[in-house]
Image: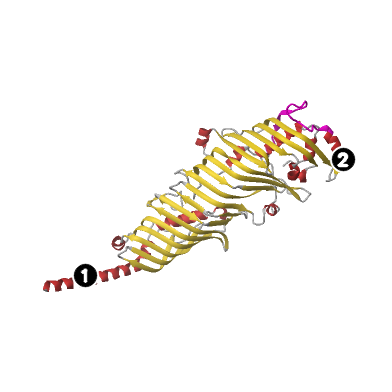
Amino acid sequence: MKFLKIFAVLVVVLLVLFGIGVYWGKSWINENLESIVNSNPDRKYDFKFDRIDVDFFGKVILINEVKITPFGELEGVYVEGKVVQVLLSQVDVLKLIMQRDLIVQNLSFSQPDFIIHIPLENNKEAKPATALQSLFGDILSRGMIRNFQLGRASARMMLGEDQIGSLNNLNIVANELSTDSLKWNYPIPFDYERILISIDSLDYIMGNGQKFKTGKIGFDTKNQQLQMNLISLKYPEGIQKASSKMDLQVDLIEFSLDSLILSGIEANSNLYSNLDIRAQKLEVLGLFLEDFRNKELPRPPNEVKSLFQGLLQKVNFPLKLDTLKVSNGAIVYGESVPGKNQTWQFHLDNLNGNFVNITTIPEFQTLFKHFDGKFTAKIEGSGNLNIDLSVPYDKDEFDMVVDFTSFRLTKINEILKPIMNGEIVSGNLVRMNIKIHADVYRSTNLFRFDYSDLKIEMYQKGSQKKSKLMSTIANIALNSNNMPGDKRYMTANYTTQRNRYRGPFHLVWSSTKQGMMTIVPGGVAKEIMGNSEK
């Protein structure tokens, strides 16, 4: 009996001591956790806690209302914010108390609200995404943290007092982190087993006033895939009004697309800070791109332009894509007509095809030797257009074959009426085929233009009134038919001198136009097309 009493007393004492220990431990964590988290003198941010709840038995620490503020003077873009709740689970409590080391299996941030501050000076060089990456790195470097989760985060991007962007419902799951190994390729800058990221929407006002927007974004390192939906880059006031604010003629571009899928992402890609994209395939679905030039404005000073190589050289980061696939795309080119307060547009729609072996990396350019493209499309929803393109990497040249069939020539009136000196009354394009080899000085062309039942009407000079005399003369001069087997059937083999101050598409158009003017006699094609020189 005496033994049982002594044992009972010891149990009670131990329970009391344990209770005191637990109470002391909780009090110690409440008093010291903030200072432990903020102990690194090289940290960029301070974390201030409102209330801490500790579950010793569950090895869980719950922190409510966390404020994030910069530590010291930060140059460039920086972040501040608050987090509704921070959960640390499977915490090594003994090491936390005895050695002041934070060893955590799981760290979870719930409903963070970030403000990304962009400096007014040098704001064009600012990278808001890099600021968030730096913050996440700063958070995870404060201990040995195995898994990290960020849920329902939002962010606002501020330029001075003005909001220029936002990010909604950002979620990140990062598993099996090695927080002693920096890796800046992804938002969590450490080695990992897997990272999953999702965003509901993102918008950002660019330096030129355009607004970039996306819908849902999903990224999974295990599947090596990034998907972005409902992407757009547009001028808020519209592309034509934006062009009126320019000092010189420039090509303004807007675009939207249904989705973009980057798959087969290579391990040495960098999608976050210093962009470096290397992947098996980039799929662009539902692209609508508009290019507009205001020709009421003076032209910029002439500068020599490259061909298709020059377009690729404008990509200012390492890029390697085995395949770039476009599905259900459309491209619209438009111009204002000087002195007429009118515009015209050319629509290339139902665009499908792909480029292969696209790269800006010299060693892969040597390996691939050239990149190739093969596309199908329609013009204003009509005809059947096929384009084959091959561009060598070691010289500024290209080979192109364009084949266009089954097109009503009267459709040209709808496209180019504001710049035409007449109209096409009837005519059917059976086949147009042009083979182009181009270098920096000229293109060598083989042209075929098969048409039937061509009839035109000419306008009086300087007006939209029809001239019966000029129309009669023009129709007598031209061949109404140019079909294989006809006595006067023509093809053309010729050279087009290149205007080196224009790009490759201008050369393709000039080569095609010269072929039409060669085959349609009497200067009729030149007269009716007017001066559409870009």
Residue holding disc 1? 14
Is 94 placed above or below 276 here?
Answer: below
Q: Position of residue 471 (x, y in %)?
A: 84, 38
Sequence-wise, the earlier of marks 2 and 1 is 1
Q: Residues within 10 Å of mark 1 (few under 14, many from 20)?
A: few
- Marks 2, 1: nearer the viewer: 2
For badge 1, the amino acid type reads Leu
Tell me how many marks there are: 2
Answer yes or no: is residue 318 visible: no
Magenta stretch holds residue 78: no
Is 213 placed above or below 312 here?
Answer: below
Residue at image coords 64%, 56%:
236
For badge 2, the amino acid type reads Lys
Residue holding disc 2? 468
Residue at image coords 71%, 53%:
244
Q: Is residue 446 left or right of residue 106?
A: right
Q: Quadrant of residue 532?
A: top right
Query: Which residue extends farthest left?
Result: 2
Residue at image coords 54%, 57%:
201
Q: Is residue 12 left or right of residue 256?
A: left
Q: Position of residue 307 (x, y in %)?
A: 63, 37
Residue range of the region highlighted in magenta in the rendering:
476-500
